[in-house]
Amino acid sequence: MLTAPQLRAARALLGLTIDEASDLSGLAPDAIRKAEASEHHGLPEVSERLRAILESRGVVFLSEGEGSGGIGVRLRQTAHDEGIRPQNLNSANDG
């Protein structure tokens, strides 16, 4: 089960306001505020809807024992596009 601090941190990592998270999830802003303020896990359906939206945007939720410091959140590592190497730059590909 996700914790309120995990939900707040995940939304913050993505730079989403409560209103933006509401638009993406279809949840009322007050439901999101309550889920992020609750220390006793709020409504599971709200947390699960938020989880799905946040994970689809790259958030990874860590449970106890994952990573190096207990429960938390992080952004999924994506493939890094190196682009054009400096030695291959020229006037034809100078964007």
Image (cartoon, rainbow, N blue to C red):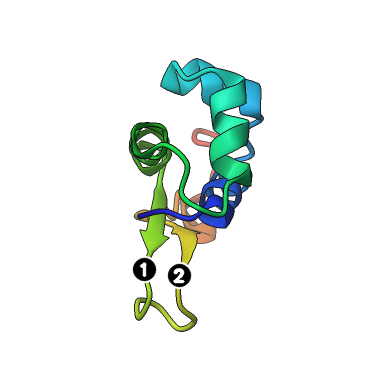
Task: Identify residue type, mark 1.
Answer: Ser
Question: Can you say whether 7 is above or below 30 in the image?
Answer: below
Question: Can you say whether 80 is above or below 93 in the image?
Answer: below
Task: Identify residue type, mark 2.
Answer: Ile
> Residue 48: horizontal and vertical position, in percent?
34, 38
Badge 1: residue crowd in 10 Å (few <14, some 14–19, many ≥20)? some
Q: Residue 27 or 89: which is nearer the viewer?
A: 27
Instruction: Tell me the element at label 1.
Output: loop
Q: In the rendered image, is residue 52 in sight?
A: yes
Residue shown at the point (45%, 70%) measured from the top left:
71
> Residue 43: horizontal and vertical position, in percent?
41, 36
Location of mark 1 (residue): 63
Q: Are marks 2 and 1 in contact (CB under 8 Å)?
A: yes
Question: Can you say whether 38 is above or below 62 in the image?
Answer: above
Query: Could you tell whether 49 is left or right of 8 in the image?
Result: left
Label 2, label 1: how many angstroms apart (C-alpha)?
4 Å
Classify residue 29 by image quadrant: top right
Location of mark 2 (residue): 71
Question: Can you say whether 68 is above or below 46 in the image?
Answer: below
Classify residue 63 by image quadrant: bottom left
Q: Residue 92 or 8: which is nearer the viewer?
A: 8
> Residue 74: horizontal and vertical position, in percent?
48, 60
